[in-house]
Amino acid sequence: MGAGVFVPARVLLLLMGVLFSLVIGLVAVIMMRATGVSMVNSIFRGGAAFTASMLIWIGAMAL
């Protein structure tokens, strides 16, 4: 048979949440830059959006 690595479903869900949150953070940075905000401020806003999205995702996984 195959020698594949077994990855639990919860780990896959967490990785999917990380990718989803990264996209949200990137969109937040792009939107902030489009409005003329400085790069440093937009990166901090994108980081805040990433953190909030991950906290919501991890909370939803706990339910």
Image: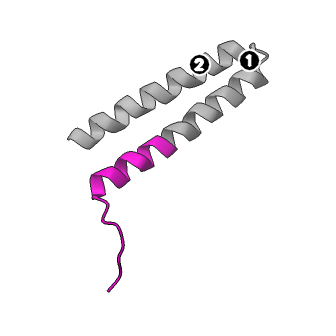
Identify which residue is drawn at 41% across, 33% down: 54
| Placement of 18 over or under 35, stated as above or below | below
* CA separation in Å, label 1 and label 2: 10 Å
Instruction: Let me know if residue 7 is in the magenta part.
Output: yes
Q: Which residue is mark 2?
A: 45
Q: Which residues are magenta?
A: 1-19
Give the residue type at disc 1: Met
Instruction: Let me know if residue 29 is in the magenta part.
Output: no
Q: Residue 48's spot in the image, x, y percent?
A: 51, 21
Q: Determine whether the residue tagged by mark 2 lies in a helix, strand or loop.
A: helix
Q: Which residue is mark 1?
A: 39
Identify which residue is drawn at 35% across, 81% down: 2
Residue 22, label in figure: none
Q: Determine whether the residue tagged by mark 1 lies in a helix, strand or loop.
A: helix
Q: Residue 11's spot in the image, x, y percent?
A: 32, 51
**Numbered circles on residues, count:** 2
